[in-house]
């Protein structure tokens, strides 16, 4: 729990904070780009509008006089006088900082101010106007070379407008003029400020909403995370308890298997030292009878006693394990097969890899008992026909199969007997699997699977 609290209290950049920072950076960047784009669009629209208005004014006032100036071979004295009068009064005198009329040959045919020795002209703008379109560009103070030094101290709107012939509408010249854009500059600055204020308010609103949503989500995530940590801690505790319980059960099963082997050895010794000795004494007394009647009667009794002694000795040998402690698993399996071969005189095929993993002593005892019981059942019920042993490793499991070619039995209805039931309990107690299949065509197969311990 202290480690969990430490993890909770030291989170400098958790998921919610990181997401909020990233979202803020992206949103502010996007809004900044949008503000710049809107400002540029406003400037372009305002400049275009002012240029169109000025071009219309010039077209309405200047065009009638420009027709004469641009017509080759005509008298231009009266037209120049009227244009000079228009330039000297009204809006034209206050707004226009420079004014020129160009013919299509690139020559200035009229200018109210003296022309400089080196004429400067925006060739690109001139070509645009000659194509019939109005060209406009807002220039900062001091950027234009086409006006005098006094005019360069204020921002200017540079305009190139086409002059069209009356009646045909054909472009016959270009009017170049520079309008004082001080008022337009102020208007544009106000528009930019308003647009940035609007963008800032929208951005702030979106950030506020985003912050509230993320903060609520972060609190929910934190509460769910704490709840999940508590659940994981409880589950970890239960898992540790289950592991300890499993170890206890496994140790109990191993102790039970060891106690069972000790009990079987003691039972074998008690049978050998008790009933077998008495039966041997009875057999000796019966053999001392000499009369014919007694001899004939005692012969049958003596044979019965000898048969009982033989069967009891076989039971004792089955109850007592040979010394297998310290042997590896392969040696234990071979010893079980060899013991059955000595007892029955039959050869049992054994299919087993050259190398087998070593199992604990409790598992080795279990395998010995499985092979012993399986071969004894094959001898008892199938007269040893087709009996064989197969041992193999499948992943981390050791598999042992004991087969015979007997008539089999119904594994669902027939009783398996105490032997198979005891083997099943023994194998399951060691965490293994025990299966029995039996058919009249294929006989009986006992399959045992035991886990290979990690080394």
Image (cartoon, rainbow, N blue to C red):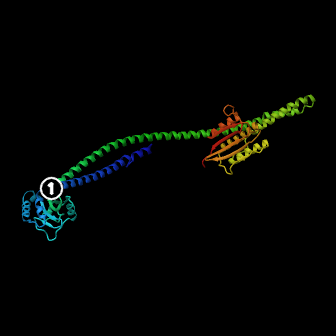
Residue 187: where, in percent of width, then height?
Answer: 17, 53
Would residue 409 be visible to someone looking at this image? Answer: yes
156 sits to left or right of 206: left
Nearer to us in this view, 429 or 294: 429
Compared to residue 409, the image places residue 324 above or below, namely below
Nearer to us in this view, 206 or 52: 52
Nearer to us in this view, 314 or 391: 391
Name the element at disc 1.
helix
Image quadrant where residue 310 sits: top right
Mark 1 burial class by Cα count in 10 Å: few <14, some 14-19, many 20+: some
Q: Which residue lies furthest to the front in this view?
A: 167
Looking at the rendered image, the quarter that the N terminus falls into is top left
Figure label count: 1
Q: Residue furthest bottom?
A: 117
Nearer to us in this view, 23 or 268: 23
Q: Residue at x 32, y 44 (%)?
A: 210
Residue 158: where, in percent of width, then height?
Answer: 17, 60
348 sits to left or right of 293: left
Image quadrant where residue 160 sits: bottom left
Residue 148: where, in percent of width, then height?
Answer: 13, 65
Residue 121: where, in percent of width, then height?
Answer: 18, 66
Q: For mark 1, what is the residue? A: 56
Would residue 158 be visible to someone looking at this image? Answer: no
């Amino acid at each position: 729990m202290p480690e969990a609290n430490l993890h909770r209290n030291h989170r400098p950049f958790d998921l919610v904070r990181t997401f909020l920072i990233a979202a803020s950076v992206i949103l502010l960047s996007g809004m900044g780009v949008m503000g710049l784009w809107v400002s540029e669009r406003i400037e372009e629209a305002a400049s275009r509008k002012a240029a169109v208005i000025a071009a219309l004014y010039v077209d309405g006032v200047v065009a009638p006089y420009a027709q004469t100036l641009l017509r080759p071979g005509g008298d231009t004295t009266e037209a120049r006088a009227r244009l000079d009068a228009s330039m000297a009064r009204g809006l034209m005198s206050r707004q226009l900082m420079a004014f020129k009329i160009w013919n299509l040959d690139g020559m200035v045919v009229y200018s109210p101010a003296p022309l400089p020795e080196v004429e400067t002209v925006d060739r690109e703008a001139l070509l645009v106007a000659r194509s019939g379109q109005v060209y406009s560009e807002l220039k900062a103070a001091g950027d234009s070379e086409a006006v005098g030094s006094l005019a360069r101290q204020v921002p200017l709107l540079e305009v190139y407008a086409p002059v069209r012939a009356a009646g045909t509408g054909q472009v016959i010249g270009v009017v170049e003029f520079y309008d004082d854009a001080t008022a337009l500059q102020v208007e544009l600055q106000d528009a930019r400020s308003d647009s940035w204020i609007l963008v800032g308010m929208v951005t702030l609103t979106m950030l506020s909403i985003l912050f509230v949503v993320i903060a609520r989500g972060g609190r929910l995530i934190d509460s769910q995370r704490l709840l999940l940590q508590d659940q994981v801690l409880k589950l970890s505790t239960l898992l540790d308890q289950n592991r300890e319980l499993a170890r206890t059960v496994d140790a109990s099963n191993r102790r039970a298997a060891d106690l069972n082997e000790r009990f079987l050895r003691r039972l074998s010794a008690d049978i050998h030292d008790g009933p077998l000795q008495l039966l041997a004494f009875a057999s000796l007394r019966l053999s001392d009878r000499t009369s014919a009647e007694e001899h004939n009667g005692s012969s049958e009794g003596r044979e019965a006693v000898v048969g009982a002694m033989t069967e009891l000795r076989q039971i004792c040998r089955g109850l007592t394990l040979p010394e297998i402690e310290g042997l590896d698993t392969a040696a234990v399996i071979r010893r079980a097969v060899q013991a059955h071969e000595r007892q029955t005189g039959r050869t049992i095929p054994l299919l087993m890899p050259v190398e087998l993993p070593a199992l604990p002593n409790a598992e080795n005892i279990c395998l010995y008992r499985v092979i012993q019981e399986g071969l004894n059942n094959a001898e008892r019920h199938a007269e040893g026909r087709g009996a064989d042993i197969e041992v193999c490793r499948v992943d981390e499991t050791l598999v042992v199969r004991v087969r015979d070619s007997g008539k089999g039995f119904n594994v669902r209805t027939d009783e398996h007997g105490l032997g198979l039931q005891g083997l099943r309990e023994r194998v399951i107690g060691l965490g293994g699997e025990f299966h029995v299949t039996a058919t009249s065509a294929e006989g009986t197969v006992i399959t045992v699977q035991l886990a290979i311990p990690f080394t």
